[in-house]
Amino acid sequence: MTTDYNDDYNDEDDDNEMTIVYFEEAIDELILIKLDILSRNNRLNARKEVMDLIENHTNIIVTKHLAVTEPPRCPTWNGSQRLLEAYTKALELYCNNNSTTTIETNAVKQLLVGLCQIIKQQQMLVRNSSTKLTASMESIVTMIQNNISNNKTMIEDTLWEIASSSKTNDNIHLVAISLGFCCCSDTTKWLDCFLQNTLLKQTSSLSSDMELCSILLSKIETDDWEKQIYPVVGKKIKASPDKVLETVQTMMKFVSIDISTTKEDDSILLLLTKQLKSPKNQAVACSTLQTIGLSSKKNAFVVAESITTALSMLQQPDQRKKVYETLLTIAKYSLAASQNDTTSSSSSILTGLTTAVSKDTAKTAAEARETGICALVWWIAVTKKFRKEDIPDATLTYFRKTMETSTIEFLPRIGAIFSALLSSEQEHNQKKKKPNNNNYLVESILLSLFASSSNVTKVEQGLQSIIEKASSSKKTTAAIEGLLALYMSLLYSLDFNSSKSTTNKLAMITEKVLSSSKAFLYQVFGGEQNATTKQQPWLVRYLLPRTIALYIK
């Protein structure tokens, strides 16, 4: 009788093959679309089956499957997340269960390549998903830093090997560069590698390249920016702005540094503001500046100041309109913040905006003018809310002189204070049943117009003239102007600082208009009940009940 010494070996080999078959089936199940719509228990069971196989048969699954096959294609983002978790766990267990003498370096390399490929898949699954991509890469970095005690040096060396190889067309080496930068202590060489494979490569770097490097860019310190990144970025913008600005725009979505510390005579702000006068590059330059401005509260003021300075060199209304829109967005961001940078001054922003908006007339630049006034109002509100400084007199005069002279500019300018700060917020808050938080800012701005006047009598006479004109006219516009003047008169008279200056004549006219049923207020708008209906202009629905309330008060 002969003994077959290969029986045990063959049995073990068969078991390994069955393990791989089970794992392949479990992985295929894990990434199915139907799993996204099934119950949470179904997903947990599918995940547990995969994780149990990895934990109980780590070496077999890694060396016989994960290291020799590419990750399967995931049809959904959720499926890719589950697959990413499985690969990350496999790498963690394989590195921790093997010593430096028994571990297969190629297996580790292929696991890391697989992780990079999954990240690349995720980029293709959800466009403009940089936040999600960053979170996915962060989970890998956290695992490497916290859960792999031995073999960490080999991980770093392997990532460098992948990062140094750009022969593939899928750019997975960019993911490896990002992971290596975050995992390793020597960041200088990784930043050099990043620049060589993006901004310094012969072919133009794409915005999608920057998305794959989002986690690297988000962790750049100010010192890294000034010494390594900006010298390259600045040189590229100076040489060929039209080719690189879109890439820089995407890059700045992830970079979070304090640009207020950079040199004023050589900064990315200076280079970008120079592009504002270029019809070809203005849109992307504005968008990039806005991205930087929204990255931090301090940057918001630095960027706004830089943009406002550039307004003086823009000759066309449509060019100014784009800059106004950028300033408006940054102002809204600043006003919405629960806290704000109190060290920066907004005086130059207000002065520059006032000068620019004054150039735009209703006839030649109606849209630009409307947007500019709106931006100006929002920056006044930011100053009122967070600053202890006074509003520049030139800015107050821009609004106040329409009251003093009762010109046709009264409604467009003074009405903008209400519409800019209240109309959109009013509708938003009504839907959510929230109080309007900007009411006090509107009142504060209006009272500033009175308080800053060197000739209060002239202001009162101007408001009186507007009210009298409304009383003798049947036009809706004149009536709205009269209502606005009434509201301002009552607000002014109730303010304790100005009550002694209010003339008896203005008070008498206000009394007459509000107490007479034949006054324009009721003839045109039909009283408070009708004025608050949706058929009336928004400003009327807002002002009339408040005007009557102030009168009763």
Image (cartoon, rainbow, N blue to C red):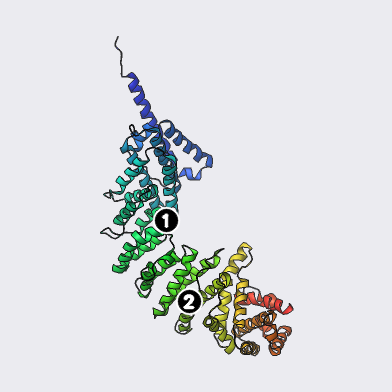
Near-viewer residue (267 or 379): 267
Near-viewer residue (437 or 476): 437
> Residue at label 2?
348
Q: Which residue lies most toward the top here?
A: 1
On the rendered image, what quadrant is the C terminus found in?
Answer: bottom right
Q: Is residue 416 left or right of residue 89?
A: right
Image location (x, y in percent) of residue 231:
32, 63
- Would residue 537 be visible to someone looking at this image? no
> Residue at label 1?
218
- Would residue 321 be visible to someone looking at this image? yes
Image location (x, y in percent) of residue 1:
30, 9
User: Is 401 above or below relative to 426?
Assistant: below
- The residue positioned 65% from the left and 73% from the top of the image is 533
Indicate the quadrant where residue 205 lies. bottom left
SS of the residue at dot 1?
A: helix
Near-viewer residue (364 or 352): 352
Image location (x, y in percent) of residue 542:
63, 74
Report the number of discs: 2
- The residue positioned 47% from the left and 43% from the top of the image is 34
Residue 147 is labelled as: none
Indicate the quadrant where residue 228 lies. bottom left
The kind of residue tagged 2 is: Ser
Tag nearer the camera, 2 or 1 = 2
